[in-house]
Amino acid sequence: MKRRDFITLLGGAAAAWPLAASAQQAGKLPTIGFLGSSSASGWSPWTAAFVQRLNELGWVEGRTVAIEYRWADGRSERVAEIAAEFVRLKVDVIVTSGLAVPAAKQVTSVIPIVFALGPDPVGGGLVASLTRPGGNVTGLSIQSTDTASKRLELLREVVPGLRRLAVMANVGFPQGVLEMGAQRTSGRTLRCGRCTR
């Protein structure tokens, strides 16, 4: 029963999620690879909440579960290195935010990856569909690309003479590019004039 609680905690991973065979060895605790995209201090409120909820479900760090924490300190190149390290460590699941998922997905198609929050996982190529994601990635999504047209529509109401809009996004982040494209399409539909990057 505790195993099911653990799975539910990690964002709805499939109920049949098996721990890797190595985790079944006597004395080896199930291991979570916790990948933070910024610093430990920046993630401290979320890390504390995560550990508290694990405890409430009977998963006590060091006693019933091991957690390997790694921090990218805002350096995107570190995310791939950390994900590869988790594969070498044979963690049972990788927990991260949506920003780090593409890099983690590139290094493993076997270890479950659970993201705490992210933009459009379908548009970003993280999952096949919301109803049947397939693969090894699951999590919670804010679906920001779905609201792009509504945000622009509201902006147009506030600024009726809006003719030109610049959208700033990190072009190295696939979700940002998707959202920028949705804004551009919406701008054309609303005849807002020219949208630039």
Image (cartoon, rainbow, N blue to C red):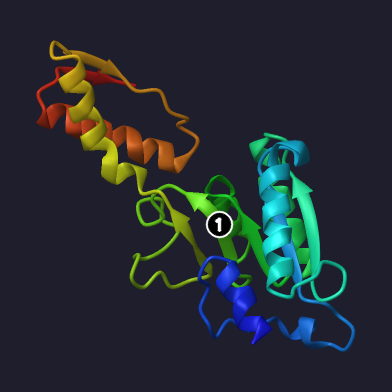
**Image position of 54 with respect to 34: above or below:** below
Number of numbered markers: 1
x and y percentages locating residue 43 in the rendered image: 69, 42
- Please tell me which residue lies in front, 17 or 83: 17
User: Which of the image's four quarters has the C terminus?
Assistant: top left
Q: Residues within 10 Å of mark 1 (few under 14, many from 20)?
A: many
- Note whether residue 109 is visible: no
- Please tell me which residue lies in front, 173 or 116: 116
Q: Residue at x 90, y 84 (%)?
A: 27
- Residue sticking out furthest to the front: 56
**Image position of 123 with respect to 135: above or below:** above
Q: Mark 1 points at which residue?
A: 115
- Please tell me which residue lies in front, 123 or 45: 45
Quadrant of the image occupied by residue 83: bottom right
x and y percentages locating residue 184 in the rendered image: 24, 30
Q: Residue at x 14, y 28 (%)?
A: 188
User: Which of the image's four quarters has the N terminus?
Assistant: bottom right
Q: Which residue is drawn at 70% across and 72% down?
A: 92
Q: Is residue 171 left or right of residue 67?
A: left
Q: In this view, does 23 lie to the left or right of 150?
A: right
x and y percentages locating residue 122 in the rendered image: 36, 57
Q: In this view, does 190 lie to the left or right of 60?
A: left
Q: Residue at x 55, y 45 (%)?
A: 99
Helix, strand or loop at disc 1? strand
- Residue sticking out furthest to the top: 161
x and y percentages locating residue 195 in the rendered image: 24, 21
Q: What residue type is labelled 1?
A: Phe
